[in-house]
Image (spheres, helix red, strand yellow):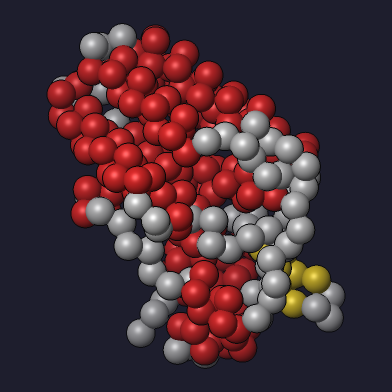
Amino acid sequence: MTSQTEIAQRVVDSILAQKLKPGERLGEQELAGVFGVSRTLVREALMQLQARGFVDVRSRKGWFVVEPSIEQARDAFAARLAVESGLLRQAGDQGRPLQEITRRLRQHVKDERAAIEGSDAATRAFLLADFHVCLAECLGHKLLSDILRDLTARTTLVATLYQSTHDARQSCDEHAQIVAAIAKGDLVKAAELMGRHIGNVEQALGKSSASAPDNRQRLQAALSAIETPAAARL
């Protein structure tokens, strides 16, 4: 049986893949049908997501994916910059071989390029966001990888809501440059490149876009499992 944590994670993964949009209604009955569980379990998952800042509840209307303000957007990007730059600057102190770290990251970038060339927009969006989570995992920071998953999902909501013009190929190229710097042992350069990358994504934000339509079919499609390469799930 699907647990509340699994339901919550599926929602976050769908946000990372830009399949769930800011302002989208998450009906308890519809979600119960999608996952084949009780409304009680769905409500517990939604409360977990509310505590993590991904959904809010509106009186007499129900649960909705949050629509971040521009101030919340800046805060999320600043938090990512602090965490990710700090991770890279301290990577040399972890005692993990850089070759081991870069091997998986290079494969991740390769998977990103393949997804960009393909037609699955959800997998492409998920992998581009997941690179940052993968980086923390490769550096041996399980706790921070969980934090980064949530921070990256928040900035994904921001990018969706404010119609980011940051191109997928540009993101992938910037990821590749970061990995190349790590491979050379130039962690200061890698941190600088990460800061520039996060800044580029933030600067590409435009105006708020309209919320997605609300219906059971849309939720079914949005919350379907995301097919990602095996390397991204290790």
Q: Is residue 44 above or below residue 144?
A: below
Is residue 107 in view? yes
- Of residue 226 and residue 110, the one placed in the foreground of this image is 110
Q: How many marks overall? A: 0
Left/right placement of residue 112 relative to residue 102 reads right
Taking the spot 63% from the left edge, 49% from the top edge, the residue there is 160
Q: Position of residue 171 (x, y in %)?
A: 46, 32
- Of residue 64 and residue 2, the one placed in the foreground of this image is 64
Q: Is residue 47 above or below residue 136?
A: below
Taking the spot 28% from the left edge, 49% from the top edge, the residue there is 232
Q: Position of residue 205 (x, y in %)?
A: 69, 36
In the displayed image of the protein, which residue is found farthest to the right?
59
Left/right placement of residue 163 relative to residue 39 reads right
Left/right placement of residue 111 relative to residue 123 reads left
Q: Position of residue 124 (x, y in %)?
A: 41, 49
Taking the spot 47% from the left edge, 30% from the top edge, the residue there is 170
Taking the spot 78% from the left edge, 42% from the top edge, the residue there is 207
Left/right placement of residue 95 relative to residue 115 reads left
Q: Quadrant of residue 102?
A: top left
Q: Position of residue 167 (x, y in %)?
A: 52, 36
- Of residue 172 and residue 8, the one placed in the foreground of this image is 172
Dividing the image into 4 quarters, which one contains the N terminus?
bottom left
Is residue 141 in view? no
Q: Is residue 162 above or below residue 22?
A: above
